[in-house]
Image (spheres, rainbow, N blue to C red):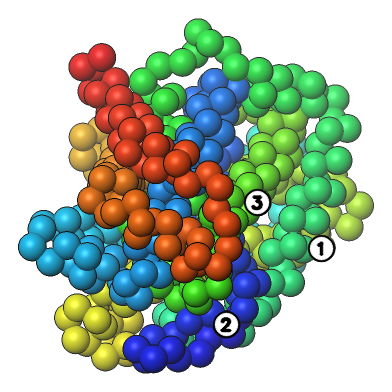
Amino acid sequence: MTKTENQTNRAVFTTRLGAIATTVGSAVGLGNIWRFPYEAGTHGGGAFMLFYVVFIFLIGVPVLCSEFILGRSTRSNVFGALRKLAPAGKWHLVGYLGILSSLMILSFYSVIAGWTMEYCFQSAAGALDFASESEYHAHFDSFSSGNWRPVMWTVIFLLCNLLIVVRGVTKGIEKASNILTPLLFLMLLVFCVNSLMMPKAAEGLQFLFKPDFSKIDSGVILGALGQAFFTLSLGLGCMLTYGSYFNDRTRIGRSAMMTATLDTAVAILAGIIIFPAVFSFGMSPEAGPTLVFEVLPAIFHQLPGGVLWSAFFFFLLFLASLTSTISMSETNISFFVEECQMSRRKATFVSTSIVMFFGILCTLSFGCMSDVTIMGKTVFGLFDYATSNIFLPVGGFVFSIFVGWFLERRYLKTQMTNFGTVRFKPLPLLVFCLRYVCPVAILLVFLNSIGVI
Ligand code: PFF
């Protein structure tokens, strides 16, 4: 991706591929390969999947457009964008929630990214060679519940993220990810074929794709909404910040649709890999956050050259996590730099220090702090639940109302048509979704989850 400075001294992506690759890089990550299978697994499979896909296209795509519009038209961070457009209003306060969410997500995300690094090394060293699935489970359990090794990886991961973000050298990593993300996709396709040949593949697919309507409850619906926001990096201003780097020729509608489609495809592929294996190995789909780390190594073990597959896959997953954490860091760093007048270096250190502290607490949630619970959840569980299921949808609710009701339709048209140079036919649909569908649906899901309806 190439960035150049525009008249306001802000970087902009110069190529269309740059804009798409970075937004897809942010969206595709652990959310697709780690979080989606475990959420689908604990929320009844097909029922979750149904709501998830509907939410992605009905709510996710319009909210994604709204973030791009806000970012590109103001060339600001989340906080500055809302203040520029509504100086007298209090809309910008939602920016604080966005910054808080990005710091909290970074904290627990780094734990999982650390796990991928450990498993990359363990695979390469041939240490993931067990005879039975229960041994994979026990092995992962003993690693993740340990105190120092997972903490070490969380810290190392955050330092990698810091080194990239502080120098603003995202160029290299993003160039690499232009090649590596398609490679990850290809690998997923290969693993998919392998999983489809497993003895209980049909059972796994049925679990994932056939909705069991008796399983639908408020938890399933809220979980699917949260996953839709998390996986598209929505509701905290991350896509808004990336939108602020779009050039005036980037087609917002197409970029949003393409990001959502590719991201969903990756999540579904991950599901097709995991669930046939879960059923064939006689494991439980409800294992929670540790699910894929127990299932994937057991799958790789069966493949010829499994050590290489495994090491390479976890390496790609590590890189996919980095492109996501870079985008989260960019959200709060652009805020610290532009709103608190910090240097980029200072902003990066402040952000990393906060995240490292909470990241360590999240890591220990699987170890010596597993008994420390707040509202029945560990620190990790609470951060994950509160951000995805509450903060991000609240952010999306505010963005959709602001863009749908507060901004003039002409303003949206200008952005969606690139100042009248291209056509954007579904404008009325977009406005309808932003005005009615998104806010009402988010509200209903919330009211449902607190038992009001
Ligand atoms: N969308 C990323 C994933 O699915 O892994 C996670 C994420 C990135 C969430 C950036 C939020 C964010 F701002």
> Closer to the camera, 140 or 201?
201
> Closer to the camera, 333 or 377?
333
Under tag 2, what secondary structure?
loop
Q: Is residue 436 above or below residue 238?
A: above
Amino acid marked by disc 1 = Leu
Under tag 3, what secondary structure?
helix
Q: Position of residue 35 (x, y in %)?
A: 52, 44
Residue furthest out toward the right = 304
Q: Earlier in the sequence, mark 3 or mark 1?
A: 3
Q: Residues within 10 Å of mark 2 (few under 14, many from 20)?
A: some
Label 2 CB-ligand 1 distance < 8 A: no
Q: Earlier in the sequence, mark 3 or mark 2?
A: 2
| Residue denoted by label 3 | 262
| Residue denoted by label 1 | 308
Q: Is residue 411 above or below residue 157?
A: above
| Residue denoted by label 2 | 14
Which quadrant would residue 347 be assigned to in this image?
bottom left
